Amino acid sequence: MSDGLPETMHCVEIAGKGGPDMLRLATRPVPHPGPREVLIAVDTAGVNRPDVLQREGRYPAPPGASDLPGLEVSGVIAALGPDCGTLAVGMPVCALLSGGGYAEYVVAEAPLCLPVPRGLSLTQAGALPETVFTVWHNVFERAQLAPGESFLVHGGSSGIGTIAIQMAKARGARVFTTAGSKTKCDACVALGADRAINYREETYEDVIRATTEGRGVDVILDMVGGDYVARDIGIMADDGRRVSIAFLNGSRVSFDMMRVMLKRLVLTGSTLRARPVAVKAAIAAAVREHVWPLLESGRVYPPIHAEFPLDQAVAAHRLMEDSSHIGKIVLAVKKSA
């Protein structure tokens, strides 16, 4: 490749459907950016639950996307395709991807690249896009969480949960969350949760009913699915909204539709990866307007639990599956070079 860039790069491939051992360090040609695309020399790549699902064969890359895992990165722009607006070579950015992040170089859509928030490191920025885009779109655009309302996020110690707690609190909501240990619950409270419920020791519905004097919560963000759907319906306030973004306990559910009708509930959900670039670009613009100031002021930050070199992606996935982490897991790609 021209401009002093290497011809090849290290990356992590998925050798086949299965466990973490299916991740293999490999060498591939450095990709070339096309129109409205940039080439990023990757500093940090976020590790997310969809990466695990892709490795297991349950979440394939959309048509045209890289088959490599990795949905978010930070780094420095190394090359530009035509029509990239104000982006420039050498600019530090973070970007939402449809795939390809587990690599030393990745091509990203120009509209999905955002400047690194002032005061944050490239490592922190690499833990932002997938999480922040997901929370903003689902909690504030789809569910329309408003100041003064109550909010429940299941899995509060996850990457999504830790950001959702902070963003909801910063925007004036009363925040509840569930987590699986005292340590995790304490961490959620430290991030701003008004009440963290250890689901191994308490029934979260009972706590919500008692704490809200029977009213329930206005908005729920759920990554669990299964029987949580029916249980959540029972603790939603009138005109409540519930958003599903994952199904760790299964996507097939059963519940009483009459309860939904009587309380005028909205049950919705979304995925992000396969959405058109224009849709994700609109989310990116909203995130920059509404969330970047919270990050730059320090009111919201991405807690990072662990960093692994690129060649230790297997260990990163094992930690993700173990679910003992609090916050984000990242691959320190540049440090691996």
Image (cartoon, grey):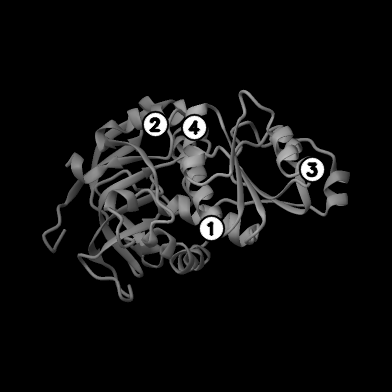
**In terms of secondary structure, where does tag 2 sit?**
helix
Task: In the rendered structure, find residue 317 and report the number of the disc placed on it.
Answer: 2
Q: From what the image shows, is residue 208 above or below residue 95?
A: above
Which numbered disc, 2 or 1, marks the residue that appears first in the sequence?
Answer: 1
- Residue 212 placement (x, y as % from top left): 73, 44
In the displayed structure image, the side of residue 319 where residue 332 appears, left or right: left
For the point 29% across and 69% down, the residue is 81
Mark 3 Cα shell of 10 Å, populated few (<14), some (14-19), many (≥20): some
Task: In the rendered structure, find residue 136 and report the number of the disc placed on it.
Answer: 1
What amino acid type should be assigned to the residue bearing mark 1?
Answer: Trp
Q: CA distance from mark 3 to mark 1?
A: 28 Å
Q: CA distance from mark 4 to mark 3?
A: 26 Å
Q: Hey, which quadrant is residue 37 in on the image?
A: bottom left
Q: CA distance from mark 2 to mark 1?
A: 25 Å
- Residue 255 placement (x, y as % from top left): 80, 38
Which numbered disc, 4 or 3, marks the residue that appears first in the sequence?
Answer: 4
* Image quarter of the N terminus: bottom left
From the image, tell me which residue sits under label 3: 214
From the image, tell me which residue sits under label 4: 184
What amino acid type should be assigned to the residue bearing mark 3?
Answer: Gly
Q: From what the image shows, is residue 209 above or below residue 66?
A: above
